């Protein structure tokens, strides 16, 4: 395992910081790809942290300090961050297989798998397809909703999930992002968690590191994802967190609520939480709360039967 070659331009222009204290950046093997990763040593049930679509492993920076003492690994899923960007191979089964290969390299036979958004679908798929390796599964505002049940046709959903094609001077990008921080705040710690999503090209403009075509290929896998089918195969304790706005609801709210109502009848061991007032990127908004849930799941998984 060697240190990954990150984007020098992104590191210089966007101020990418080292990992939180005690973290070690290195490379792990996936299923035919190289994965950027950060590891924190500790004791107890191992924990794998997986980010959402178009994000990267530094997304967990604010959560990690609250998990001090536990063995952690934060991974750049294929196509993201410092990981390889193959032209194809973004099916959830393949991305979940990467995690199993990475765990093999670490000598971890089992782990608590934690995913945010798209990462929740990866975590659920891993737990379903590799049941002997999942101590527990946490899906944070993702992984429990089949997008096909939202009442919109595929073309409309696909269009809605297209990312913005920003190409901005780095200072302008930072100014734009700083106006949309959770609770209206923008701190150096938050910047270090978010800015590695972007890199600066030879023209001096900042763009998403995840290519548009790859982003949309992953969107297509999400449109095909059948949450209830996958989650019905999960045998380990499964913690499912729904982030729900107060004083209003998005147009996925009814479909999300209906999905959560059905899950206790189809899953073996669900633990369903609804966090009112939480934004989708709740690990940036309430990192201590997210860490508390992860720690509870890890301690529960490590407890004697």
Image (tube, rainbow, N blue to C red):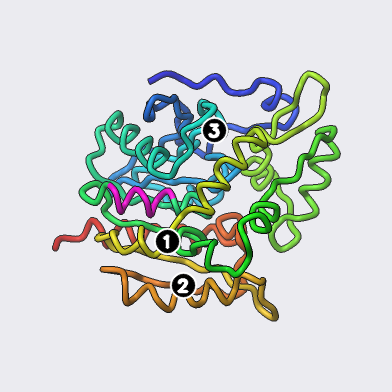
Q: Which residue carries the number 3 mark? A: 79
Q: Residues within 10 Å of mark 1 (few under 14, many from 20)?
A: many
The answer to whether 210 appears left or right of 139 in the picture is: right
Could you tell me which residue is drawn at 79 percent across and 39 percent down?
166
Which region is colored magenta?
122-129
Residue 79 pos. (x, y %): 54, 33
Question: Horizontally, is 291 left or right of 249 in the view?
Answer: left
Mark 2 burial class by Cα count in 10 Å: few <14, some 14-19, many 20+: some
Question: Looking at the magenta stretch, what is its main secondary structure?
Answer: helix
Report, in whole angstroms, how far the alpha carbon at label 3 lies from the one at label 2: 29 Å
Location of residue 59 in the rendering, given as x and y in whole percent from the top left corner: 57, 45
Q: Quadrant of the C terminus?
A: bottom left
Count of marks overlaid on the render: 3
Quarter of the picture holding the N terminus: top left
Q: Which comes before the other along the chain, label 2 or label 1?
A: 1
Q: Which residue is mark 2?
A: 259
Q: Which residue is mark 1?
A: 227
The reply, left or right, for residue 244 in relation to residue 299 is right
* Residue displayed at 54% across by 48% down: 52
Q: Residue furthest bottom?
A: 247
The secondary structure type at the circle numbered 3 is loop
Is residue 2 found inside the magenta-colored segment of the image? no
- Residue 280: name its quadrant: bottom right
Nearest to N terminus: mark 3 or mark 2: 3
Q: Position of residue 272 (x, y in %)?
A: 41, 72
Secondary structure at badge 1 equals helix
N-terminal label among 3 and 1: 3
The reply to whether callout 2 and callout 1 are in contact (CB within 8 Å) is: yes
* Most foreground residue, 105 or 128: 128
Secondary structure type for disc 2: helix
Q: Is 45 above or below relative to 280?
A: above
């Amino acid at each position: 395992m060697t240190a990954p070659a990150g984007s020098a331009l992104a590191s210089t222009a966007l101020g990418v910081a080292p990992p939180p204290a005690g973290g070690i950046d290195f490379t792990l093997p996936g299923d035919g790809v190289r994965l950027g990763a950060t590891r924190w040593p500790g004791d107890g049930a191992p924990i794998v942290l997986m980010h959402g679509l178009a994000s990267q492993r530094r997304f967990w920076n604010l959560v990690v300090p609250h998990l001090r003492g536990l063995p952690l690994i934060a991974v750049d899923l294929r196509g993201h961050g410092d990981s390889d960007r193959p032209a194809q191979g973004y099916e959830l089964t393949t991305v979940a297989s990467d995690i199993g290969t990475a765990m093999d390299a670490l000598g971890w036979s089992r782990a608590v798998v934690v995913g945010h958004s798209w990462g929740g679908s990866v975590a659920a798929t891993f737990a379903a397809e590799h049941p002997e390796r999942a101590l527990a599964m946490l899906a944070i505002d993702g992984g429990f909703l089949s997008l096909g049940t939202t009442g919109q046709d595929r073309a409309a959903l696909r269009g809605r999930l297209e990312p913005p094609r920003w190409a901005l001077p780095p200072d302008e990008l930072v100014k734009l992002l700083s106006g949309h921080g959770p609770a209206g705040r923008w701190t150096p710690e938050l910047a270090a968690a978010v800015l590695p999503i972007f890199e600066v090209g030879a023209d001096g403009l900042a763009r998403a590191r995840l290519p548009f075509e790859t982003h949309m290929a992953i969107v297509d896998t999400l449109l095909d994802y059948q949450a209830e089918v996958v989650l019905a195969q999960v045998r380990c304790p499964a913690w499912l967190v729904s982030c729900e706005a107060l004083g209003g609801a998005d147009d996925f709210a009814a479909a999300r609520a209906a999905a959560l109502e059905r899950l206790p009848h189809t899953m073996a061991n669900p633990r369903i939480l609804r966090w009112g007032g939480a934004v989708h990127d709740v690990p940036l908004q309430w990192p201590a709360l997210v860490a508390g849930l992860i720690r509870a799941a890890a301690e529960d998984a490590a407890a004697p039967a």
